[in-house]
Amino acid sequence: MAETAPLDDNGRVRIAPRLAACALALTAVVLIVAGLVLDRVAADRHVSGTGPVWLYPFLVAAVSAPAVVGALISTRRPRNPIGWILVLGALSLAIVLTAQTYGLLALDAHHPGSLPGGSWAALVASQWPFFFAWPLAVAFVFPDGRLVSRRWRPYAIFAVVPMVLLVLLLVLAPRLEKPFSDVPNPFPLRLPDALGFLRLPIWLAFFASLFVGAAAARTRFRRSKGIERLQMLWLAYAALLIPLGVVCFLVVGFVSGEDGNAALAFLLAMEAAVALAVGIAVTRYRLYEIDRLINRTLVYSLVTALLGALYAVVSVVGAVIAGHGSTWVTAFAALVVAGAFTPLRRRAQAAVDWRFDRRRYEGLQRVRAFVDDVREGRREPEEVGAVLAAALRDPSAELLFRLPASEAYADGVAGVVTDPPDDGRAATRVEHRGQEIALFLHTPTLLDRPDLLRSVLGAASLAIEIARLRVEVRLQLAEVEDSRARVVQAGYEERRRLERDLHDGAQQRLVTLGIVLRRLQRSLPREAQILGPALDSAVDEVGRAIEDLRTIAAGVRPPRLDEGLAAALADLARAAPVAVELETTHERLPSQVEAAAYFVVCEAVTNAVKHASPSRVRVQATVVGETLRLVVADDGIGGATLTGGTGLTGLSDRVEAQGGTLLVHSPTGAGTRIEARIPCRS
C-alpha cells in the first residue's frame, strides 16, 4: 500500500477523489445518526420493532468505523480500492439501517400515511446481505486491491454470484424480511414459484463464500512476509470473526426463535472490527500482539462451545434423573462447568496451537519436556540455550545470563561478557518475577512472532533462572580459586625473595665478618696472641649464625628445588628421622607445582613422624597425564582426619589452591595414606 495520490496535468494532487471520499463518509455518518433520531421518535410513539438504546453505540461504530478509515485511506491513496470499499460499505450499511427505522415509522398503524414510501424503505431494509458485502470484498483484495493470484478469480466469482442472487431473491420475494414480514413487496416483479427451491442453495453458497473470503485472507497471510504479514494478521482475525458472528446469529435464532439484539450487536461489532483491523494494519500494525489475540480468541471460543455443550448435557441428564428441572440441577451443572474450565482451557490451548500454530506448539512441548528433565535431574540447566535455539528454530540464537553483582552477562562457556555482541541479532530480555535474568540474542524475524517468543521464553524461565544461579556460583568459585592461587603464588614468590635476601644479604655479611675476624687473628702481634681464643669463639658464633640462616632459608624454600622436585625430595628423605622410601619422577614441572608438591610431602612426613610413630614412610611422586600424583604412606598408628588437628587441613588448602584434590585414608592401627593430585599443565 505504497501508492501515491493521483496528480493532474500540472503535477498537483487531485482534490476531487478526496472530496468524494469525505463526502460519502460524512453522508454515511449523517444517515446513521438520522436513523437513530428516527428510532427515538418511533420509540416515543411506541412503534414495535425499535431497538434498545444500548444498541446505538454498536450501530454508530458499525458505520462510522469503515467510513472514517475508508476516508483516510482514500484521501491518501485514492487509486487503492480498499478505501472506497470501506466508504461505500459504510454508506450501504447506513442506508439499510436507516431505511429500517424509516419504514417502521412510515408503516406505523397508529400514524398511517405520516411518511411516504414506507414499503419501499422496508424493501431496502430487507437487504441484509449488505452487512457482509464489503467485509467480504476486503478479505479478497486487502492490502493492495488485487486478488491473491489469478487462480483466485473463480473463488471471487463464486463469492459475488451468490451475493447478487441473494439480493435478487430478496427483491423479488413476495414477502419482506423481518420486521416487515407482513408488508407486501412493492417491487412489481416476483420470483416464479418453480424457482423457490433456489433459495436454500443460494443462501448456503453465500454462507460458504464468507469462509472462502477468510481462506483468501489466510492464504495471502501465509504467502506474506515482514510488514505485510503483520498487516494480514489483523485482517485474518477480523475475517475469522465474521463467520463466527453468523454462526452466533443462527444459534441464537435457532434457540430463542428470534434473531435477538445481542446477535445483532455482535454482527455490528464485527463490522467495526474489520474496519478497525484494516486501519490498524495500514497505520499501526505493531500496536498489539495480534497473533496472541487470534490464539486466545480461538481458544476461548472453543472453550465456550465445549462448556456450553457440557452445561446442556449435565442439565438434561440431571433433569431426566430428577424427573424435573430444579435449582439444584442448575447449580450442579454450573459447578461441573466451573470445575471443567481449567482442564478444558488447557486442552483447547494445546489443540489450537497444534492445529493453527504448530511451531509454537512444538516449541513449547520441547521446552516443557526439557524443564521436566531438569526437575528430574536427567539434564543440566545450562543446556537451556541450545534447547531454546532448537525450539525457536534459530541456529544463531544465544542465551546470556545476567550477573546482578557486576551488571554484566555470562554465556556459561567462555565466561563473563561485558557487552553483548553487536552482530545484527535482535536482543530480548528474559525476566523472572520482575527481574532480568538473561538476554536472548536471536534472529530479527522472531520479532514478527512476539507470542511465540514470549511463550517459549516464559516456559523456560525457571530453567534459565536455575542455570543463571549455577553459572553465577561457578564463576564466583572460579574467582575465589583464582584469588587463592594468586595468594599462594605470591607466598611462594615472597619465600623466594626472602631466600635470596638471606643468601645474598645477611649470610654474605656474616661470611665476610668471619673472614675479617680470621685475618685479624692472623695479623695479631705475638704479645696479643692472648686474644686468639676469643676470636676463635667469635668466628665459631659467626659460623653457627650462618648455619641458622641456611636452615631458615631452607625452610622458606629449599635451594635444591631449583634442581627439580626429585632432588629436593631426595634431600628431604636423607634428613628425615625415619626411613623414607622414595619413588619420584625426574620430569621438570612448573615451579609453583614443584613447590606445592615439596611442601605437601614435607608436611605429610613431618605429621607422620610427629603423630603416627611410624617405622618407615613411602613417598611416590608420578605424573599421570597432566596431573602430578603424590602418595605419602606410613605404617604408623593411623586415625588421622582432615579435621583432627593433625595439620592435614593446611595440606588440603595448599593442594586446593593449585586446583587439586587431597584424599586421606587412615584407619586406626593400619597406618595413614595421603594422596594428592595437582594439575601440572604448564
Image (cartoon, grey):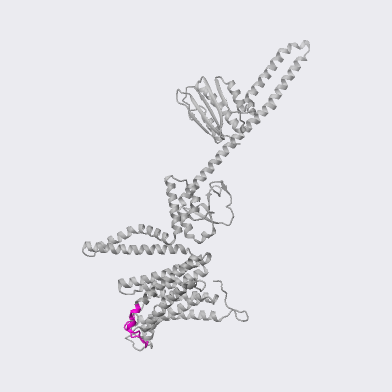
Instruction: Residue 217: give x, y in percent of width and height.
Output: 46, 69
Left or right relative to 194: residue 576: right
Q: Which residues are magenta?
A: 179-199
Instruction: Residue 284: give x, y in percent of width and height.
Output: 51, 67
From the viewer's side, name the closer residue of 345 and 395: 395
- Can see residue 372? yes
Instruction: Residue 469: give x, y in percent of width and height.
Output: 49, 46
Q: Is residue 497 above or below residue 13?
A: above
From the viewer's side, name the closer residue of 424 and 265: 424
Residue 112 belongs to the span the image colors magenta: no
Occupied quadrant, residue 657? top right
Furthest residue in direction left, as rendered:
323
Residue 183 belongs to the span the image colors magenta: yes
Q: Is residue 417 above or below residue 3?
A: above
Instruction: Residue 45: give x, y in percent of width and height.
Output: 34, 83
- Can see residue 269? no
Q: Quadrant of the C terminus?
A: top right
Number of numbered markers: 0
Left or right relative to 312: residue 451: right
Left or right relative to 166: residue 153: right
Q: Quadrant of the N terminus?
A: bottom right
Occupied quadrant, residue 243? bottom left
Tell me which secondary structure the magenta stretch mostly adopts: loop
